[in-house]
Amino acid sequence: MNLRDATLRVELDNPLAAEVHISLYSENGKSESFWGYDKPIYADPFVTNETGVLTLNLKDIENTEGFDIENIRGILVRNMETGKSVTVKSITTSCEHMPKISNCKAEYKSGFWNISATMKNAESIVGYKIQKFVYEQNESTKNVSCTNSGCKMTGDVFVYDLEEDMDSYAKNLGKPIYFKITPNMQNGAIDPCETERITSGEIKASCSINKTSVVIGEGIPVATYSLSGCPDAKCGYEVSLGDVVLAEATGGDVDKNTTNPNKANAGTQSLAVGEYSIKMRSTNSDRPFNEVECGKFEVTEQKVEIVPTVSCEDVKAKVGEKVTITPSVTGCDDGCSYTLTGIDPMASGTLPMTGITYTAPSSAGSVVHSLTVTNQSSNRSGSCSFTGVYEASGTGGGAVSMDCEFAKSKVFPQEQLVLNTINIKGITENKQLNIMLNGSVVKTMDCGYGSCWNNQFAATNSLGTHTYEVMLDGYRVCSAKLEVQSAISCDVSSEEIGLGESVTITGNYLGSCWNVSVAVNNSDKSWPQCNSMSYTETPTALGTYEYKIKVNGNPAAECSKTVKVVEKAPTITCPDNAAKKVGSNISVKPKSLSGCSNGCEYNLSDGFTTSMSGYSYKGDAISFTAPSYETSVTYQFEVKNDKGAANCNFTYDYKTSSGTVYPLDLPKDEPVVIKADSCYSITSSTASCTNIRFNCLWNNASEGCSIQVNSNSPTAGGHNSSNNILSPKPNEGDVICTSDHVDKITCAGW
């Protein structure tokens, strides 16, 4: 390890101020042909009597002969005074020459995952381990060796194209995926970094039909279908009517129509009267997609006669000008023709979608027009009549013109408006003109030669864009558009959340605010400040919630958003691996479980002899009997709901007894770790118990660890001893301390 220019931090518990020497040792640089090539070179020690955290600048020892700061093998901390207790609590370093990895990314492109990571000080890196995780489970691992330039670097960025198994990619569509990248040095790995969670796409099908009714023996509707999101050319599909396959293929994305409408309901294969459905489904289970219904259609005895419906509105115009009417028409999907009477000559043709244009009569007066619309397939007709009022130019409203616009184009409801008028023509004496909205008079405005007045009024309460018209004698003189917008708008962090997730509603208010309140389902919950209209909560039950922000101000305003709290795909964390007694009663419960508040389907299995499953599972303990012989069993715990599934694994080691004693030689002043699945007899009389760390992590309350010191059972390390059982049970890393030597440490049996 290269510790050039590094800082070493050593935390000591040295209450009696014992003299402590702290030394680094390195490789000596000799080849294997020299005697002592494997002996380390020790640097001159740092000497201290202090307690607490010591910060040591390693530049101070770089001048030691033969010592290589760039090839550190270890750190030696020695207590130089007998009878004084010193504990090393932690040792850490910070060094700008250490390799560091960050900014890990992954992007899928055309069968490869493009992996990249920023890698500082990569010179000592000999390879990388790239792990792929799906639903937090390690699915695959790729080891990349830097030998023979196997690690591609672009500047300080490591890049690697990881080839994807397409069957695996298709299986994981729609699931969360991430990668963990671990750089390896010659003498070990450094801390890895992870990419963000990536949810790959999914295969989606869509389909529709062109008609909803056919006659017996005259074929079926044409289906238009598409498939998107195929990862390769192995997507299989079929479009079918019951057992009759209308279209099928294997390939990639597709966008087509069925080409043979006579494949069913034709000739001797006619369908009976009734309702039928055309569907599109997957034919490759390795490239699945949800079945979709293209549509339902009805088979009838005879053609359904479609009768158009028509409605018209009266018009006003000047004589001789072009007039366009846009009637409301239904029943013309197959095409319609029209005739219009009351004009000379009568107008006729194919009904256009943009309206019917004709020339107004040349004489002033009122004319009743008749419009007849005929369906070209059924030959059935519908009609309407309307009155056209036509006035000659000169003295009436048709002779007056002006331009008008609002002083502000965007206002709040009931805000005071001013309608400005310019370019006034045709007014030689005072007249009253009506300002109208949706056919109703909102203000009567006075106009004279060159100007108008009494043109102020309040905006409508209706939000949206409105057209105000200035009318005189039934003629529209001018018009102006106005957008009425709410003084407040709301937004929520998500309109659908999972149970246990939080939601935030925020408001944006444009008026003059006095105070604010937030209500949930009409119950006041919060009173935020005017300058921070925000409220966050975590709903505790499934259902629909209405969040409303109400502002008391000028103008008063309120807005609301609806949030649906649903059960999302489950997540599960298994219990820890543990040792269990042969033949005992086993109780299994997840460490954590979400997405099952309404109950999940579950399965707990070892894949061989043990399998338990059920429904409505909410996290209760599941019990079974342990095997009757010593073995190690790995279980898979899976939960499902209608949104997805999750699983995890754990292992139980089944043993007859935990009382086996293994000899262990304890060198002086060296810490010893006692493992959770073994017991030890300590034979060295020189071992100081102040340096013994042990980990004996059993699961049942009756289990634990015992310590004997000179055949006695002392209080050790804060743990009270009764019948050689320490209570509470020691945790990993606990230091068991007495003033005597340790004779034996054993794990308690069942």
Image: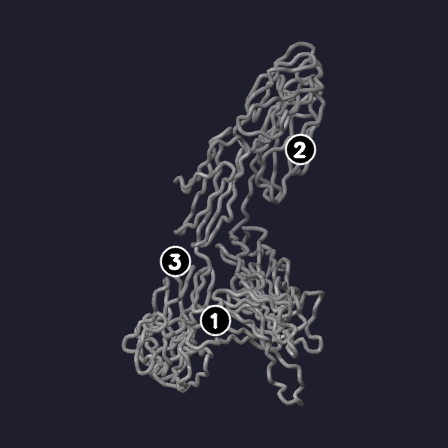
Of callouts 2 and 1, which one flags the residue occurring earlier in the amino acid sequence?
Answer: 1
The residue at which mark 2 appears reads as 356
Query: Where residue 435 sits: x, y (%)?
Result: 59, 21
Q: CA distance from mark 2 to mark 1?
A: 95 Å
Res. 597 mark:
3
The secondary element bearing badge 1 is classed as: strand
Residue type beneath disc 2: Ile
Q: Nearer the viewer, residue 413 or 733?
A: 733
> Is residue 684 visible in this depiction of the protein?
yes
Q: Nearer the viewer, residue 55 or 160?
A: 55
Image quadrant where one finds the N terminus: bottom right
Q: Residues within 10 Å of mark 3 (few under 14, many from 20)?
A: some
Q: Nearer the viewer, residue 630 or 96?
A: 96
**Horizontal side of residue 96 vs 509, given as left or right:** right
Residue type beneath disc 3: Ser
Q: Are marks 2 and 3 in contact (CB under 8 Å)?
A: no
Q: CA distance from mark 1 to mark 3?
A: 47 Å
Q: Residues within 10 Å of mark 2 (few under 14, many from 20)?
A: some
Q: Nearer the viewer, residue 214 or 518?
A: 518
Q: CA distance from mark 2 to mark 3?
A: 61 Å
Compared with 256, 140 (above or below) is below
Mark nearest the camera among 2 and 3 is 3
Mark nearest the camera among 1 and 3 is 1
Query: Where residue 110 sits: x, y (%)?
Result: 66, 66
**Horizontal side of residue 587 vs 559, given as left or right:** left
Res. 88 mark:
1
Residue type beneath disc 1: Val
Image quadrant where one finds the C terminus: bottom left
Query: Image point 34% across, 75% down: which residue?
Result: 704
Compared with 738, 266 (above or below) is above
Query: Image point 63% across, 12% down: which residue?
Result: 431
